[in-house]
Amino acid sequence: MAHSSDLIAKDIEGYLKVHENKDMLRFITCGSVDDGKSTLIGRLLYDSKMIFEDQMAAIENDSKRFNTTDEAFDLALLVDGLQSEREQGITIDVAYRYFSTEQRKFIIADTPGHEQYTRNMATGASTCDLAVILVDARHGVQTQTRRHSFICSKLGIKHVIVAVNKMDLVDYSQETYRKIKDEYRAFAEDLEFKDIRFVPLSALKGDNVVNESLNMEWYPGATLMRLLNSVDVHSSSDEFPEFRMPVQYVNRPNLNFRGFAGTVAAGEIRVGDKVASMPSGKESKIKSIITFDGELEVASKGMAITLTLEDEIDCSRGDMLVRPNQKPHMSSTFAADVVWMDEQAMEVDRDYYVKLGTHQTVGHATGIEYRVDVNTLARSEAAKLELNEIGRVKFDLDTGVCFDLYSDNRETGAFILIDKLTNNTVAAGMIAELVASDGSVKPKYSVHELELNAFVRKHYPHWGAKDITKG
């Protein structure tokens, strides 16, 4: 839903052009059960005047019908759409909502707090740039708060806003807010977050959500909405520069046309550029870049395109188009951080389907390096992973696959495991390390490559590539 603007009445085409060019922020709301995630989103939309009158009327009727709160108006019902969610007053599935302000556009993923539905939380977090982690001011940092924070960190989210909610229930105590802030900072020291912000608020009353609170004059910072509008999550230094496009299907409508369709996962490509099809390594040049709206000269990350090549080379679904001097890793073995999502435990040597991008093969775990305690982040030995447990696992696949480390590129470093009997998705994985054929972990670079990278970064910083030696 778009914000109201005087430009709509004066120049609708101009308004749409401005709206189209706005920056997009994807963020997730997560945390422990009953911390107020759905209510917070409802308050964001309500105070931003992003709810239609018929929606308001429907929510008011449902608030009286389900009576999940003592209040006459339950904002959580705006995103809790399932019948069972409304009856119980909880979030079960991931709910996505879209809205915009004058500064940027937003896609919100509202995720469940129950441990039983951690898999749904991981699904929502996998495409987000920022996490709003809610903490109930009465209870402080809980086990599920830590679990969700750890998963967000492993999934590559670098920016976090810790929203200390329900401040109205602790009399807007500054001391309570400070204790929670200190406790979370101590826990998050070992996580891979780059930017952590804190804001005390009450989603139910509206304090510090969109409007500044008169009850917490001791808080000098910005409201949640102001932080969402201003946080910079698209730093150019974080962008993976190398071109990657997993081929989704071969577009062959007639004898005179053969194109390779897919979504650009990283980098950009221009007409005339050289590309290589992996794993075969066969090379050609880009003849044309075709989209639904016509042909382009250049395509970049996130664009759905069809590429035609000057030469007839072997390339099919599951292959990856890259630049010849920027090839990804190619291996049948690697180590990955795994979030286990199935009632039946993960077992070593059991075969699963492994789906990495558009490529699917069969593989099995050869060993579990360690399991992580989400409360202390301590590592322990494990023979298997139970539901919602997280660990570092070594894999051996039947065929070699093309990938980047997840820390370099989220799009080409993530995979899922599928049970061969039930066809259920049982785990999400993030490739963390290269593994040699003998099972030993290989360093990302040799000593010589590390020295070369350091030299180039020092003397040619404008190159910007994270991994200069690849290819």
Image (spheres, helix red, strand yellow):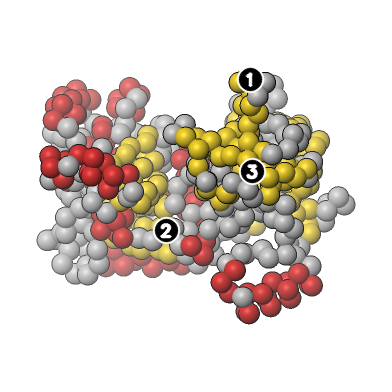
Amino acid type, mark 2: Val
Q: Which of marks 1 and 2 is nearer the N terminus?
A: 2
Tell me if residue 279 comes above or below residue 376 in the rendering.
Answer: above
Q: Quadrant of residue 40?
A: top left
The residue pinned by badge 2 equals 233
Tell me if residue 22 comes above or below residue 398 in the rendering.
Answer: below
Taking the spot 45% from the left edge, 47% from the top edge, the residue there is 128
Crowd band around label 1 with a 10 angstrom C-alpha radius: few (<14), some (14–19), many (20+): few
Residue 424 x %, y %: 61, 26
Marks 1 and 3 in Cβ contact (< 8 Å): no
Closer to viewer: mark 1 or mark 2: 1
Residue 220 x %, y %: 22, 70
Crowd band around label 3 with a 10 angstrom C-alpha radius: few (<14), some (14–19), many (20+): some
For the residue pair 121 and 135, the one nearer the viewer reads as 121
Residue 389 seen in this snapshot: no
Taking the spot 53% from the left edge, 54% from the top edge, the residue there is 156
Tell me if residue 185 comes above or below residue 165 in the rendering.
Answer: below
Tell me if residue 371 comes above or below residue 360 in the rendering.
Answer: below
The residue pinned by badge 3 equals 286
Instruction: Kindly report the distance in space between the C-alpha atoms of the residues bearing marks 1 and 2.
Output: 43 Å
Q: In which quadrant is the N terminus drawn?
A: top left
Crowd band around label 2 with a 10 angstrom C-alpha radius: few (<14), some (14–19), many (20+): some
Q: Earlier in the sequence, mark 3 or mark 2?
A: 2
For the residue pair 298 and 102, the one nearer the viewer reads as 298
Residue 152 x %, y %: 49, 51
Left or right of 244 in this view: 24: left
Left or right of 324 in this view: 228: left
Q: In which quadrant is the C terminus drawn?
A: bottom right
Residue 450 x %, y %: 73, 72
Left or right of 57 in this view: 177: right
In the drawing, what numbered circle is on residue 318?
none
Marks 3 and 2 in Cβ contact (< 8 Å): no
